[in-house]
Image: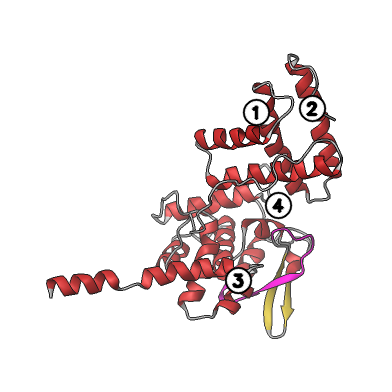
Amino acid sequence: MNEIIVQSSNAVAQRQTVGAELLKRYISFLDSSPKTIETYTRDLRQLFSFFSLNGITQPSREDIIAFRDELKASGHKPTTIQNYITATKVFFTWTEQEGLYPNIAKHLKGAKVDRDHKKDYLTSRQVKEVLGSIDRTTEQGLRDYAMLFLMITGGLRTIEVTRANIEDLRNAGDNTVLYVQGKGREEKTEYIKISAPAEQAIRAYLKARGNAPETAPLFASTSNNNHGERMTTRSISGIVKTRLQQAGYDSSRLTAHSLRHTAVTLSLLAGRDLAEVQQFARHKNIATTMIYNHALDRAKNGCSEAITSAILG
């Protein structure tokens, strides 16, 4: 196959149709999670749209570089550009393996991604203020208090909160634990230990919520339209954001992920070693945990104070 889209360079609609067929064939080949397939599909449609709009029927390495540069010029974040380029590289690896088209994206660089965290964390005092601002006289308040408490003390991701069921509350040794299905996992094979105060908050919420089957979501919606149903990651993020704002912490750098960021950071500040924190955070690579540690090392750096003291005596 000499052309990736179609031979007719002046039939835009036809190019799009053939491009869609090729994309469909590639997606059917992928052996990935639905979320990964959704992401690759979205990213590759962006690539194919670039080809179509520019009349490109035989893309070259220069065209892929132009696509990357256009993404940069359009103001896309480095992480977003990196995702697009990753999808592009995987796609052209497949076309070469299938004998459809040479791999023109081999060794292509994406965008330089800053490894420092883009979100802030909360101090222990600020955590107390956020939790203390939640009215726990209602089912919704009990739910939000228990959910935020668990996310902070357990370092949970929003996807893990969404997937959690009541039956996932179990015992391990002398501890109450919650089995979680983490990012990229297909089963709930890992668990987090739940502190006594966090468990008490969860039990108080479940009692107020009333009878629910064990297979029901651990934290359920309280809205009129889908009361008792499972919440989405988006709705959980919205709840966390609202609770942060109500406590006076209204910043674009404070989100639901900030609670996980807080859990890891406070663990390190408490003196826990890297290996223990890596296990707690369920990081595959300790290098991810070390990013937090390096950030704290900079925060502890006393050079500025020493220079000031030397100048002013």
Look at the numbered disc 4 and give the secondary structure of its residue: loop
At horizontal 68% and vertical 27% (from top left) the residue drawn is: 51
User: Please, which residue is most extreme toward the top here?
Assistant: 10
Q: Which mark is residue 3?
A: 2
| Camera-nearest residue between 158 and 63 | 63
Which span of residues is magenta-colored? 183-201
Q: Position of residue 50 (x, y in %)?
A: 65, 28
The answer to whether one can see residue 120 in this image is yes
Disc 3 marks a residue whose amino acid type is Ile
Structural distance between the alpha carbons of marks 2 and 1 = 15 Å
At horizontal 60% and vertical 73% (from top left) the residue drawn is: 278
At horizontal 85% and vertical 30% (from top left) the residue drawn is: 1
Is 283 on the left or on the right of 37, as rendered? Answer: left
Structural distance between the alpha carbons of marks 1 and 3 = 38 Å
- The residue mark sitting in front, 4 or 1, is 1
Structural distance between the alpha carbons of marks 4 and 1 = 38 Å
Q: Earlier in the sequence, mark 2 or mark 1?
A: 2
Residue that label 1 marks: 50
Q: Earlier in the sequence, mark 2 or mark 3?
A: 2
Disc 2 marks a residue whose amino acid type is Glu
Residue that label 3 marks: 286
Residue that label 4 marks: 230
Q: Position of residue 188 (x, y in %)?
A: 76, 66
Q: Earlier in the sequence, mark 1 or mark 3?
A: 1
> Tags 2 and 3 in contact by the CB under 8 Å rule?
no
- The residue mark sitting in front, 4 or 3, is 3
The answer to whether one can see residue 222 in this image is no
Disc 1 marks a residue whose amino acid type is Phe
| Camera-nearest residue between 103 and 290 | 103
